[in-house]
Structure formats: structure tokens, C-alpha cells
Amino acid sequence: MSSSISTTDSNSYRRCLERGVKCKCRILAPCWEAWKNGTHDPGRRFYGCSRYKDPHLRCNLFQWAEPQYTEIGREVIEDLRMKLSVKCDELLYLSDDLSLAEKEVSSFKEKLSVAEMKNKETVELLNC
Ligand SMILES: [Zn+2]
């Protein structure tokens, strides 16, 4: 099971919830998903030590968690990523539309409030 997908971090590695494998640091090297741009198999999981940047430890544990994708698997993933990207763009447009509509509603509510006050004043005048 992996973390949820968002396009904001599509050019990175994402940590999975899978249990890690033990590396020479005697810690569990977590499982990651490779979403870095240009990755041959986007989303393919691997184990990598969190301390790989530490020059003193020099832990370079890297181990794929699963075999390479098949060609059809790559095509399906690429197709789905493109569809997701289109949907995210649509969502941004809809979000802008919603924001405009909310401003209009707010403006109408103010006008309604003014009209209701005038109406109340008129009714009071007529009742005198
Ligand atoms: Zn390590």
C-alpha cells in the first residue's frame, strides 16, 4: 500500500507504507516510490537507506522492491498520469470558477440584505 498520489510531488520520491529492509546501518531502509521525472518505471518501489547522503556512513543500500514493468504496464501508467494531469488542470479552472461564484453570491447576499432593510422600513412606514 502506498501514499496517495498528487501531482505536486510528481518529481520526487515518495515514501511507501511498506515495511523496509534492514541495511548495514542496522536500521530499516524505507520503501520508496520512484516518481522522479525521467524514471523508466514511474512509481516502481525500491528500498533505499535514509542515510545515503551521510558521507561518513556511506550507506548506499538500493534494492528494487519489484521487477521492472512490462511495456503495457508503462503505457497504462503514462496514460493514467496524463489523464490525471488533465484532471488537475480542470480542477484548477473549476476552483477559479468557484471562487468567482462565491464572490457573486456574497455580493448578492449584501444586496439582498439592503433590499430587506428597505422593505422593512417601507412596511413600517405603511403601518403608521
Ligand atoms: Zn543504511
Image (cartoon, grey):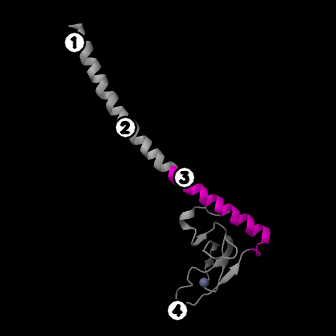
Query: Mark 3: which secondary structure?
Result: helix
Distance from Cα at disc 1 to Cα at disc 3: 50 Å
Q: Which residue is mark 1?
A: 125
Q: Which mark is residue 106?
A: 2
**Disc 1 to disc 4, C-alpha distance:** 87 Å
Name the quarter where the N terminus is drawn.
Answer: bottom right
Tag 1, which secondary structure? helix
Give the secondary structure at mark 2: helix
Question: Earlier along the polypeptide chain: callout 3 or callout 2?
Answer: 3
Q: Which residues are magenta?
A: 66-93
10 or 102, which is in the foreground? 102
Disc on the earlier residue, 3 or 4: 4
Image coords of residue 89 (percent x, y): 55, 57
Residue placed at 62% from the left, 83% from the top? 26
Q: Looking at the image, is mark 2 or mark 1 earlier in the sequence?
A: 2
Would you place residue 67 above or below residue 114 in this image? below
Q: Which residue is mark 4?
A: 56
Q: Could you tell me the amino acid type at mark 3?
A: Leu
Foreground mark, 3 or 4, reads 3
Q: Please say if the residues under marks 1 and 3 sit with CB atoms less than 8 Å apart.
A: no
